[in-house]
Image (tube, coloured by chain):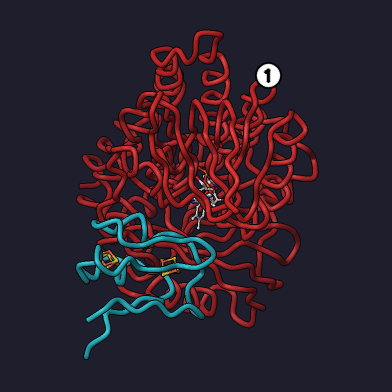
Amino acid sequence: MPLKIDKKVCDRCGTCISVCPCNALLLTDELSVIRDQCTQCGTCVAICPVGALEIEKL
Amino acid sequence: MIMEEKFDIAVIGAGPAGSMAAWSAAAAGRNVCLLERNNKPGFPVRCGEGIGIRSLTEHSDARPEWIKREITCSAMISPNGTKVNITDIDKSTVLDRERMDGDLAQDAVKAGAQLFVTSPVIEVTRIDGGEYQCRCPQRTIISKIVIIADGVESRVARDLGWSTRLASDDIESCAFTRVTSPLIDADCCIFYVGSSVAPGGYAWIFPRGIGEANVGLGILGTRCTAGKPKELLLQFINRELPGGCIGTLHCGGVPVTRYIRPLVRHGAMLVGDAARQVNCISGAGIHYSLFAGKTAGKVAADAIGAEGVNYSSLTNYEKLWKKRYGKQQERSFALKDFVTHHTDDAFLNRIAATLTKKKSRKIKYLTVFLSTFSRHPMLLFKAFKLFG
Ligand SMILES: Cc1cc2nc3c(=O)[nH]c(=O)nc-3n(C[C@H](O)[C@H](O)[C@H](O)COP(=O)(O)OP(=O)(O)OC[C@H]3O[C@@H](n4cnc5c(N)ncnc54)[C@H](O)[C@@H]3O)c2cc1C
Ligand code: SF4
Ligand code: SF4
């Protein structure tokens, strides 16, 4: 179940990047997830101050 | 076509740490570039903007325009609403960081540094000959030394072997905004503590002028769930400043852990939030960033000679940091650890109740919620014994 980024909600603050154990998040002009590095552990989801991240349930 | 350009020193991130580093290295005669992801340094501001006047003027050429408001008092509100006035702190100000960060970057440019905005560094590698290659979408920069100042995310350093990942109990997840309301005390910085206000952190109201303030809160990562800081902030504003006009809501993270060791590897140096140079109790990092950036830039400039880079002299930066702020930062971490594991709302209420009966001169230990306390860690233990 891939990590989903709500780009309208994301404030581009980088907080999620600092806690990701797999270095799977990258911020350029917007936040993106490097799919083959992400283990869907959910650490970033819980830390996001505005709730822009979600592990999608299929 | 991707351009490749060469510099003596590349600085990544144009926050206070990066701009100071670029300025001091350029002022010492080096060929410097400053790479910033955003299209404007200092925007958007992710900060409560509070700083002691002494630290500000010690580490920068502060302009009067940077100061939005001079603060004459501070207060802490305990979980049950007891207000304790704190009068023993250094004089503080609330800054205009958009202005300050913009000016610091421009100072670097005036000193000769080349600023590239809209230039996110995607990857840094050490190439043959020991030089560093910073890859951005539109350009590639080659430099002898790289100074990493990319803030809380500290992602770039991971490419060079540092482990900068933060554990959930080593970060405060924050939401903040500007509020206009007639209920704002224009002279007083107020801190609110307690598990219902901001679990494992605090909420703040820092006035920027009459009727206008920065209002925000931080929650310890282990006690945070998706979107909780935003939710609690809106509740807090409705309760404390009902009817207030709320500006755009922004968010950010504050690292609350020991500064990273080593701060220097070969020709790479870590500064500011990227190096976790933040006071773990107050979350204050502007003064540390200014100092670390200025010091690292100068040390880097001095290490470049006709024969190349004297890598061992780069560690002077780490020594100077350790001497000036290293111990203080360490103590703030020890205290944060103690506070998160051994205090609860009842404890905070007991302290507040006792403090309101004392002369403010005698209540230095209350400043646990302010940076000043980190200089007196034993006082908290004494306080604990006193009330425990
Ligand atoms: C909500 C909040 C409130 C705070 N309140 C206070 C306060 O009241 N007082 C205080 O002293 N401190 C406060 N702090 C801490 C203070 O803001 C930081 O310590 C300070 O900004 C750190 O400066 P810096 O230069 O290290 O990093 P930053 O100011 O974060 O700058 C980092 C820069 O690097 C850029 N960047 C990041 N990655 C890349 C990349 N890959 N390529 C290019 N550029 C990149 C970013 O865009 C940014 O401009 C607060 C922090 C937060 C989040
Ligand atoms: S923590 Fe949330 S708001 Fe911040 S960059 Fe990550 S997804 Fe965006
Ligand atoms: S789910 Fe885990 S691995 Fe994936 S991006 Fe988030 S923190 Fe990183």
Residue located farthest toward the front when viewing the structure as drawn? B1
Relative depth, front residue between A24 and B50: A24
Q: Position of residue B7 (x, y in %)?
A: 59, 30
The chain letter of the red chain reads B
Where on the picture, by quarter, is residue B29? Answer: top right
Residue located farthest toward the bottom when viewing the structure as drawn? A58
Disc 1 residue crowd, few under 14, some 14–19, many 20+, Cα 10 Å = some
For the point 54% across and 23% down, the residue is B295
For the point 20% across and 50% down, the residue is B342
Relative depth, front residue between A37 and B38: A37
Q: Does residue B264 lie above or below B234 as drawn?
A: above
- Whether residue B267 is visible to the viewer of this picture, yes or no, is yes
Give the quarter the ligand 2 occupies: bottom left
Q: Left of B127 or right of it: where is B339?
A: left
Q: Position of residue B211 (x, y in %)?
A: 72, 66
- Going by the numbered disc 1, the residue's amino acid type is Gly
Q: Left of B110 or right of it: where is B160?
A: left
Chain under label 1?
Answer: B
For the point 54% across and 75% down, the residue is B237
- Whether residue B218 is visible to the viewer of this picture, yes or no, is no
- The quarter of the image holding the N terminus of chain A is bottom left
- Circle 1 is placed at which residue position? B29
Q: Position of residue A43 (x, y in %)?
A: 25, 66
Relative depth, front residue between A29 and B66: A29
The chain letter of the cyan chain reads A
Q: Position of residue B233 (x, y in %)?
A: 48, 72
Q: Left of B238 or right of it: where is B187?
A: right
